[in-house]
Structure formats: structure tokens, C-alpha cells
Amino acid sequence: MKLPVTEHTGRPWRIHAYAPDFTTLDVWSFRMPGAGPDDFPIAVAAIAAGAGLGRETGPTKFLFAVRWKLGALLGWDDARAGLGPRVRSLRDRMPEDLTATANPVPGPGPFVSLYELPDECARELANKTVHAVAHLGWVRTPTGDHELRMAVLVKPNGRLGRLYMALIAPFRHLVVYPAMTRQWEAAWRDRERLLKR
């Protein structure tokens, strides 16, 4: 479910100190019935096992295939346009005690982990269009359960990046995030089977 940006910006997440020049673009919630305060790592592991990148279906799979094809044709994802050559990683802004919580090796997919704490984690990517952070946080609901929150923080790369983000907005909201919600919530419900692998 889409949430107001203040549901991310108003919480004391660690990412705020290191990405003040990023815009919080989207905030989304994922229901995790029965989840407790210590279940964040389990939710993240279940999602990685059962609903990670590369497991898209239907229209979402088609949209990602088109995006990767366009990226290859137009050089958007060239290694020289990514983290390091064009963009300094946010890891460079963070203290070692925070970055030591995660392995900075890319994958799965194009994201690189910045940090992993008991109630939040962040991953980043950069290409010719944007420098982006996917932040996941664990939030207690009014019913006492906990739910997963995802915030997407972006810094577009010039006019191309702003145009790109504007063009993909309807696809994110109408196709990608609803499909992600179904997959991630299903991964939580099926966590016991997924994490036995």
C-alpha cells in the first residue's frame, strides 16, 4: 500500500544522516501478519529466497525485460556509469561500524548493500539515469504487529534522469509495486518453507 512520504521521513532511520541530498520518491508498506519486533531479518531473508529480483512474473517481468534491453542498447547500465566511476557510494559517507554490517558485493541484481541492522537496511545502485537507494524498515502497526516499509530515495542524473523517473512513475505505481506487494507478502506467509532451503 502506498504511504505518504512523511511515513519515511518522520522516522529516525539511519539513512537520513547519509542521504540528505536524495529525494524520497515512494514509500510503500507490506503486511506481515503475526510479525514480531525481531522478525525483520526473517522477512528480508524470506523475500530474498522467494520474491527477489529475477522472480518477476507477467507484466512486471515484461517491464523489467524492456528496461534491461533499453539499458543495454543506450548504455544506461555501463559499469563506467555506476558506483565508483561516476558516482561515489554512500558507503563513503558512513562510519565503518555501520558499513561493516553488510557485504558490499553487488547482488542479487544491481543493488549493493549499504548496511543491515535489526530493524532497517539499505541498498544502493547507480547508472546513467539515477543514483538510488532502496531502504527497508520494520515498523510496529497500531494492531501490535510489525510490517515492512520500503522507501525509494533518488538523485536523478540531470535531465535524462528526471525524464526517466517521470516516465516510469505510472509503471512503478500501477504494475511494479502492486506485484511486489503480492510477492513479498506471499514470501512472508511462506517463510518457513522458503527458509528451509
Image: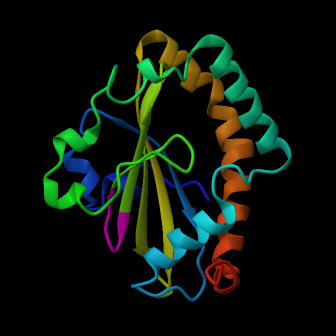
In the depicted view, which residue is nearer to us: 124 or 104?
A: 104
Q: Quadrant of residue 83?
A: top left
| 153 lies left or right of 165 | left
Q: Residue at x 53, y 74 (%)?
A: 43
Locate residue 179 relative to residue 13 in the image: left or right. Answer: right
119 in magenta: yes
In the rendered image, the vertical position of residue 27 relative to residue 31, given as above or below: above
Residue 19: tell me if it is visible. no
**Over which residues does the magenta segment extend?**
115-120
Image quarter hosting the C terminus: bottom right
> Which quadrant, please, contains the N terminus?
bottom right
Residue at 75% x, 50% y: name it. Answer: 56
Q: Is residue 6 above or below residue 164?
A: below
Query: 92 or 32: nearer the eye?
Result: 92
Percent x, y of residue 150: 49, 56
54 inside magenta stretch: no
| Quadrant in which residue 170 is drawn | top right
The spot of residue 46 in percent (x, y) is 59, 73
Q: Position of residue 107 (x, y in %)?
A: 51, 48
The x and y percentages for residue 40 are 44, 75
Q: Is residue 83 visible?
A: yes
Query: Which residue: 55% across, 62% down?
Result: 29
Instruction: Residue at the far right: name it.
Output: 58
Compared to residue 159, the image places residue 59 above or below, namely below
- The image shows a total of numbered marks equal to 0
Q: Residue at x 27, y 40 (%)?
A: 90
